[in-house]
Image (cartoon, grey):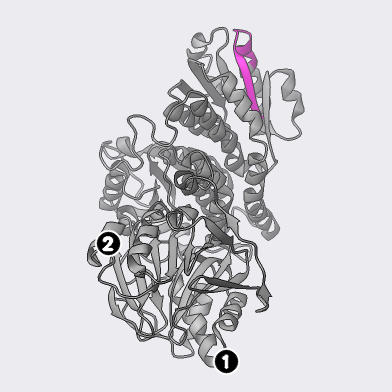
Amino acid sequence: MCGIVGYIGNKQAAPILLEGLSKLEYRGYDSAGLAVRDGENEAVVVKEVGKLVNLYNKTNGGDALKGTCGIGHTRWATHGAPSITNAHPHVSGNCTGSGSGNVESEVVGVHNGIIENFQELKEKLSKHDYAFYSDTDTEILIKLVDYYYKKYQMGPIDAIAKTLVRVRGSYALEVMFKDHPGEIYVARKQSPMIIGVEGNESFIASDVPAILKYTRDVYYIEDMEMARIKAGDVTFFNIDGDEVKKEITTVTFSAEAAEKGGYEHFMMKEIHEQPKAVADTISKYVVNNKINFSEVGISDEDIKATSQIYIIACGSAWHVGMDAQYVIEDLAGIPVRVELASEFRYRTMSLDPNALAVVISQSGETADSLAALRMAKEKGLKTLAIVNVVGSSIAREADHVMYTIAGPEISVATTKAYSCQLICGYLMALKFAEVRGTIKDNKALENYVAEILSIPDKIEKILEEKERIQWFAAKYSNAHDIFFIGRGIDYAISLEGSLKMKEISYIHSEAYAAGELKHGTISLIENGTLVIGVLTQPDLYEKTVSNMVECKSRGAYLMGLTTYGRYNVEDQCDFTVYIPKVDEHFVGSLAIIPLQLLGYYTSVAKGLDVDKPRNLAKSVTVE
């Protein structure tokens, strides 16, 4: 997820572009860049690595770039590590992308989104004498526009339309053409984009906050639409190149609210971003309904040679490992040990030399996880990182990397990064099972993949019914103790549900394997204690219900979380939440959503700072 801006008018563009990017830095902050044109002169491109302030200083607050037409970008890396070369804007010429200077290219542009078939397009363009200077999918996209623009001598709209037909993925595309000064062309599919107009000025952005200082009158461009933007004038086109009429909308909400997409908190926004984040992560590794690990770099021979897996992580990432171990062991038949990174790095233990160490971290900078990775490498183990930040320390140092496509998470309490990590665990289990032959039936493998592909829509369905959870959270927001129980995968789900509750509501919360209650913990149950039972595993359902009844007999109030169809749970539970059915191996992706919502709504009911809970930080880079 990246931030894009654009401006055409009668003022100097660069300071306005930088101001807009400052409102979008939450969308990406590993590099930034500008491309500005002064009349008919060539575009000048300036790029810098790191936070936006670096670009601000490099351009003297934008004053160093003359011109009244320009585009800008702040990046969250998905293809290629953070670097000046990989930073946007990208150009159609065969330059080095070194960071600044005039650009002798027909097309210069920025892009927010993911081009899924970029490798195929790159091969096509290579046959037509295009060379590439970056590792990004965006460079391929810009050069594809250039290819159609030149080869067929098309106008900009027709060239962009031809490009969109060939591209698979999501995009908000913003380009300038050398032969069309004073114009910016845009296109959109799935990735956000708005266009604002005020007098003789036009503004472009991926989110409203970037332009609220200048205008509240905006157009919303729809999927598979394009636009030609001039100073104070916008013309829209459909994919066939026909002109489309649009009504302008006046924005009424505040800039702060707009940054959160209309949500009260980033956490709720990120909860609602999970269907797309999960879908994007799936599409990165599932091609034509087959699991493709070519980007991960782990070979079939490596998988066959692996005799054991160590999953090493902290916090929510460790809970992902707890869930994944059940799935990997059951589907791939390979033993898995899940280790807390802070414990693993200090233990004296005999490690299997043929094991694979899987290190999971959202930021890729978690101190204990990074130290554990280095220790595993020192002991000769192959390493695989599951991380969300391209070019992070863990990503750079691991032998293999599996990136999640969650985009930046602003809220300290992880939601979408956790869900994307879980998807990576599922796909890893299926890939190992396929290669090792524990799933011999191709139809069975296809069915498993189909179940994973169904997850985003099912998350969406759960989110549509969140009001019941809001009501329940308000009722129990004054609780002193909450216990989450489950068996197997349900226990792993309970661990994350409990963490979500305690870290943002400050209510004492614990998760237990249900069978362990009678070994001491049940003594803590008293009249009114809330016990939440996760009941998604068919073979373990009755046993967990039995444990819940033991708590009820001691005065507990019971909440059950199960799949549609198991309505007899209402005979025992005081309140029940249902989720759509999915293969039992992958149900953690659905069951966690109501528990995220429960923690969120409980925190809101208590009037707490949901996004910045006390004593916590987003990236734990110290021990």
Q: Position of residue 86 (x, y in %)?
A: 35, 69
Q: Is residue 435 in sight in this rendering?
A: no
**Residue 230, magenta (yes or no):** no
**Residue 558, magenta (yes or no):** yes
Measured Cα–Cα span from mark 1 to mark 2 = 39 Å
Q: Mark 2 — residue? A: 56
Q: Position of residue 220 (x, y in %)?
A: 59, 61
Q: Mark 1 — residue? A: 152
Amino acid beneath label 2 = Tyr
Q: Position of residue 199 (x, y in %)?
A: 49, 66
Residue that appears at 49% across and 54% down = 208
Mark 2: which secondary structure?
helix
Q: Position of residue 511 (x, y in %)?
A: 49, 25
Point out the stretch of residues depicted in magenta: 549-561
Residue that appears at 47% across and 12% down = 520
Q: Locate residue 72 relative to residue 345 in the image: left or right.
A: right
Q: In front here: 583 or 168?
A: 168
Earlier-in-chain disc, 1 versus 2? 2
Q: Is residue 527 above or below residue 256?
A: above
Q: Is residue 172 above or below residue 38?
A: above
